[in-house]
Amino acid sequence: MRLPPRLVLCGRVARAAREIRDSAERRRYLVHMLTSVLRTVSALGVVAALLATPTACEWMQNPPPAPPAPPQGPLGKPRLLRGMNLGNALEAPNEGDWGVVLDDADFPRVREAGFDHVRLPVSFSAHASLSPPYTIDESFFARVDWAIAHALASDLAIIVDLHNYDELMKHPEANAARFVALWTQVARRYRHMPEAVCFELLNEPHGDLTAERWNTLLASALHVVRANNPTRTVIVEGVDWASAKNLRDTLRIPDDPALVASFHMYQPILFTHQGAPWMNPEFQTTGIGFPGPPAAPVAPVPAAASMSWVREWFDRYNREPTATNPSGPSAVVEQLEMAKSFADARHMPVYMGEFAAIDNADLGSRVKWTRMTRQEAERRGFGWAYWDDGGSFKAYDRKGGDWVPELLAALRH
Ligand code: BGC
């Protein structure tokens, strides 16, 4: 339909007016946008700069940039040379039950004291359902995430150590599937973590978890870990509480290039665990020094004297010269030599994941034992972690933030 010229003109004027209005609005809109962008740019200069680069998207999609990598050994692995256990916290039934709650400041403090890693004992089994699929509590997992993030941010490697699965030690068959399911979940959750995050399959296998059972079970757990963590460092140890003897004699190591073999060193145990309340009566004699012999003979408590191995130990402790004394250097060297013969035979890295002497012993003896054990381990090429339990073995007081200076020195020089 053709419109009369006046109406055409009116229509054009109206359209022109609309266009002018629209373009004015568009301009105002553009000006508004530009202003707010400029405001954002000036307020968030760093973000704007990142957005302007192709890597910005990656940065926005992924977590913030990783902290500097921890010291790497061959194959890009963390070296795990000198470490601290963060004990009595996440391996307690609930964090805090045993007097230790981890704190942000723990991680930089350990790093600043010269350590390159932490070992984090974690009782996953105390925070997982008892029936399939044995789900680990999300809030507990989040706490482990927190510890990992803080270790990495402090340039520390971290060992996630499955600790205190007592039911597995008592009823290995009944708990085998649950143990593997725990590792399935842990491995999946941390599969994208840097190599500085390491796994330790099980702390101190013992009890009815015999060498034969453990060798089979560890292979199953390793299998699920390797499904999505093909190159991550995984630490394994032998039965009888991670003894050096069982490392050498009974641990069957799967063919795997990223395994580290571990042992714990608490010998002579009558010295390192003297008077420990969780130990049997034969360990309750205190006043044992290192190295022996003592200035005056030490008589074992009656419960200890009734056991022949303890009686003989005290006889020798009271009279043998230091070189052969059972609370002397030979007792330490004997253990480390067992681990060394394993390392030589298997050409595998060996790690001493726990060692410490309780504070019922005099400080001078603890310091001598700690320094000697640490030096002898290093001489044989073993990395180590001191058993800092936040309690009677501790080298530093997490609450006060104070190191026991003599023990710290023994670990350093
Ligand atoms: C145990 C601790 C114990 C320490 C020394 C650790 O593996 O979990 O409870 O204090 O060994 O006996």
Image (cartoon, rainbow, N blue to C red):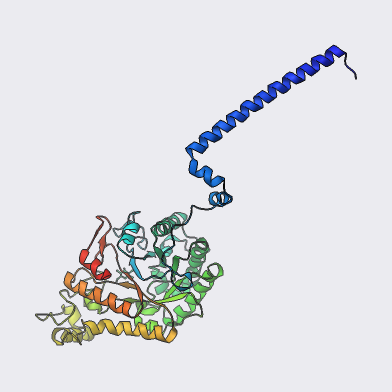
Q: Position of residue 332 (x, y in %)?
A: 27, 81
- Image position, residue 343 (x, y; %): 40, 83
Picture quarter with the N terminus: top right
Q: Name the foreground residue: 212 vs 159.
A: 159
Q: Is residue 24 above or below residue 269?
A: above
Instruction: Determine which quarter of the picture holds residue 81.
Output: bottom left
In this rendering, the answer to whether 189 lies above or below 371 is above
Q: Quadrant of residue 365?
A: bottom left
Q: Residue at x 65, y 24 (%)?
A: 25
Q: Tell which residue pokes out farthest to the left in this image.
A: 296
Which of the two residues, 263 or 167, is positioned nearer the viewer here? 263
Identify which residue is drawn at 46% across, 61% down: 128
Judged from this view, the residue extending furthest toward the top is 6
In depth, the one of 348 and 284 nearer the eye is 348
Q: Which residue lies furthest to the right in this view?
A: 1
Tell me where residue 302 appears, x and y as whole percent.
16, 79
User: Ligand 1 is found in which quarter of the picture?
Assistant: bottom left
Q: In this view, does 173 lie to the left or right of 37?
A: left
Which quadrant, please, contains the C terminus? bottom left
| Image label count | 0
Residue 22: tell me if it is visible.
Answer: yes
Residue 164 placement, left or right of 277: right
Q: Is residue 412 above or below residue 42?
A: below
Residue in view at x 39 percent, y 71 percent: 203
Residue 362 in view: no
